[in-house]
Image: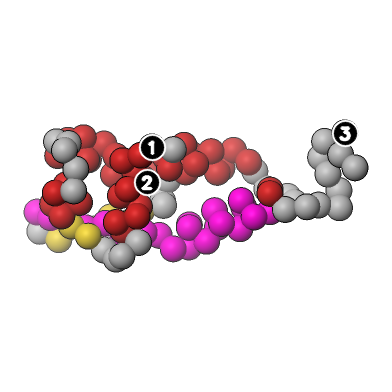
Amino acid sequence: MKCSYAEYVPVIKALADETRLKIIDMLSCGEMCACKILESFSITQPTLSYHMKILCDTDFVISRREGSWMYYSLNFDKQQELFVFLSEITSDKENCICSDCK
């Protein structure tokens, strides 16, 4: 496998948070307004913005502005890319990178 492990670190770190995982779960149902996401949490709007910035900075979540409202949705291309990467690094390989394998 020829890939850069480092390119996946930010998205994996972004997903390693309970609030952000719940947001991802909510967005799996489709695009949502920030106000609707906020209703499901006991956090402030700036805290939600912080979490959304982290998710958007990794391109795992896409944002769009409509007037004064922000809408968020999952980036299914980035999601698929992460699934493929995780599948590749967790599957059995003919040429293992560690010296103690097989």
Which amino acid type is marked by label 1?
A: Asp
Residue 1 showing in the rendered view: yes
Q: What residue occupies the far bottom of the structure in this picture?
A: 30
- Residue under label 2, please give it: 21
Q: Quadrant of residue 87?
A: bottom right
Tag 2 and tag 3, C-beta contact below 8 Å: no
Q: Is residue 32 above or below residue 2?
A: below
Q: Main secondary structure of the magenta part?
A: helix
Label 2 neighbourhood size at 10 Å, few (<14), some (14-19), many (20+)?
some
The Cα–Cα distance between marks 2 and 3, rounded to whole angstroms, is: 35 Å
Residues shaded magenta: 68-88
Which amino acid type is marked by label 2?
A: Leu
Label 1 neighbourhood size at 10 Å, few (<14), some (14-19), many (20+)?
few
- Residue under label 1, please give it: 17
- Residue under label 3, please give it: 100
Q: What residue occupies the far left of the structure in this picture?
A: 68
Image position, residue 69 (x, y; %): 12, 55
